């Protein structure tokens, strides 16, 4: 079967790869929409130590179940399903504390095993969710990035009410964080995004305001928060400049949730962090409950990315990755699959 194989920094090609063999408790899925994630772009560039080449990436996907393993629900056969690619052992101390996303034995389809950028892939049967009639694969594939947004927004809400929030970045994850914040009831959610078309998308998806820079956002918050700043800032980019920007938009006692992974090393001045009693919180992935909430909102039409772009054939995958490396575009999400659409 065909798969897109990553061989190292900026080395990717479409090749023949082994077909997955169904195992007990698993299903084989034929992906019909697999989204390219920003973390995969960083992986493509060789900046992600959790990905080892050669690797078939692809963890945001939905498709049709073609085989079911022993102990799996046979009614899944032939069903269009969304796939939660993240599994945990369920028995360790972190899992028992509800931190399944931080399980030391966690596994992610597309990182620890071949992912959705292939004709077929293997997934845990417990992690597939049949989609209702009329809901297509591209919508189901958005559940994984939206689950990240649900998790980040709820970490931001963990210690009390939030009246003013800012999301830095209006790419896929930024838009997902923004929508999760709005759907969780935060009254005023601003976006910071230098690309005009993405600012427009943020406004269309529920942002109260969208600013081209941190300076403009800071001035707007001065007016609406009596000079205090936002209760919550979510950095969905993860560049050094955005990580440094985020605390400057906060009120004293506020919280930054860092979810973006663009850079690793970052220098942040800590005098203001200490004097302002700021909370700097990391956010990694999501729990099953976050994923289920995300899928529910998508199925109900409460969240999304606006118009869904066509699914490109796998053969266009390597060039799609190379194009995404060149910088942000108006297109929020790129989907791939063997058949295209």
Image (spheres, helix red, strand yellow):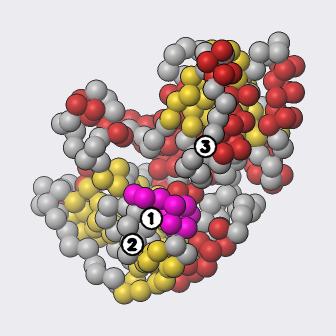
Q: Residues within 10 Å of mark 2 (few under 14, many from 20)?
A: some
Q: Decide which of tag 3 and tag 1 comes sooner along the chain.
A: 1
Q: CA distance from mark 3 to mark 2?
A: 26 Å
Which of the two discs, 3 and 2, sits closer to the camera?
Answer: 3
Q: Can you say which quadrant of the picture contains the N terminus?
A: bottom left
The dot on residue 53 is: 2
Q: CA distance from mark 3 to mark 1?
A: 28 Å
Element under disc 3: loop
Residue 81 appears anywhere in the view: no
Task: Check if mark 3's residue and mark 2's residue have beta carbons within 8 Å.
Answer: no
Residue pointed to by mark 3: 266
Residue pointed to by mark 1: 58
User: In front: 204, or 46?
Assistant: 46
Q: Decide which of tag 1 and tag 2 comes sooner along the chain.
A: 2
Which of the two discs, 1 and 2, sits closer to the camera?
Answer: 2
Residue at 30% across / 53% down in the picture?
Answer: 107
Residue at 62% across / 74% down in the picture?
Answer: 322
Element under disc 1: loop
Magenta span of residues: 41-50
Residue at 66% across / 16% down in the picture?
Answer: 276
User: In front: 50, or 58?
Assistant: 50
Q: How many marks?
A: 3
43 falls in the magenta region:
yes
Q: Decide which of tag 3 and tag 2 comes sooner along the chain.
A: 2
Query: Is residue 9 placed above or below 108 in the rendered structure?
Result: below
User: Where, by quadrant of the figure, is residue 249 drawn?
Assistant: top right
Element under disc 2: loop
Residue 306 location (% of width, % of height): 68, 52
User: Where, by quadrant of the figure, is residue 268 drawn?
Assistant: top right
């Amino acid at each position: 079967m065909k798969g897109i194989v990553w061989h190292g920094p900026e080395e990717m090609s479409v090749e023949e790869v082994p077909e997955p063999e169904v195992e007990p408790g698993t299903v084989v899925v034929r992906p019909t929409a697999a989204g390219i994630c920003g973390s995969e772009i960083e992986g493509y560039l060789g900046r992600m130590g959790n990905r080892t080449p050669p690797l078939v990436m692809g963890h945001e996907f939905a498709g049709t179940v073609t085989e079911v393993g022993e102990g799996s629900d046979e009614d899944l056969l032939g069903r269009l399903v969304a796939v939660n690619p993240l599994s945990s052992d369920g028995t360790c101390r972190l899992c028992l504390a509800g931190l399944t996303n931080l399980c030391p034995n966690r596994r992610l389809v597309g990182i620890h095993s071949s992912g959705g950028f292939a004709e077929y892939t293997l997934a845990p049967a417990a992690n597939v969710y049949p989609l209702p009639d009329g809901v297509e694969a591209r919508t189901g594939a958005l559940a994984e990035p939206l689950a990240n947004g649900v998790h980040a927004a709820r970490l931001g809400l963990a210690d009390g009410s939030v009246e003013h929030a800012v999301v830095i970045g209006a790419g896929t994850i930024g838009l997902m964080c923004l929508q999760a914040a709005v759907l969780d009831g935060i009254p005023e959610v601003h976006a910071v995004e230098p690309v005009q078309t993405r600012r427009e998308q943020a406004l269309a998806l529920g942002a109260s305001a969208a600013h081209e820079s941190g300076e403009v956002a800071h001035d707007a918050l001065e007016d609406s928060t009596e000079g205090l700043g936002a209760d919550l800032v979510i950095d969905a980019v993860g560049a050094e400049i955005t990580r440094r920007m985020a605390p400057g938009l906060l009120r004293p006692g506020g919280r930054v949730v860092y979810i973006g992974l663009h850079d690793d090393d970052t220098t942040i001045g800590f005098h203001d962090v200490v004097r302002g009693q700021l909370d700097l919180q990391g956010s990694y992935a999501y729990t099953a409950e976050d994923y289920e909430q995300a899928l529910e909102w998508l199925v109900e039409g409460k969240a999304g990315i606006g118009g869904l772009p066509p699914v490109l054939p796998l053969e266009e995958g390597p060039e799609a990755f190379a194009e995404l490396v060149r910088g942000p575009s108006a297109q929020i999400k790129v989907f791939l699959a063997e058949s295209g659409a």
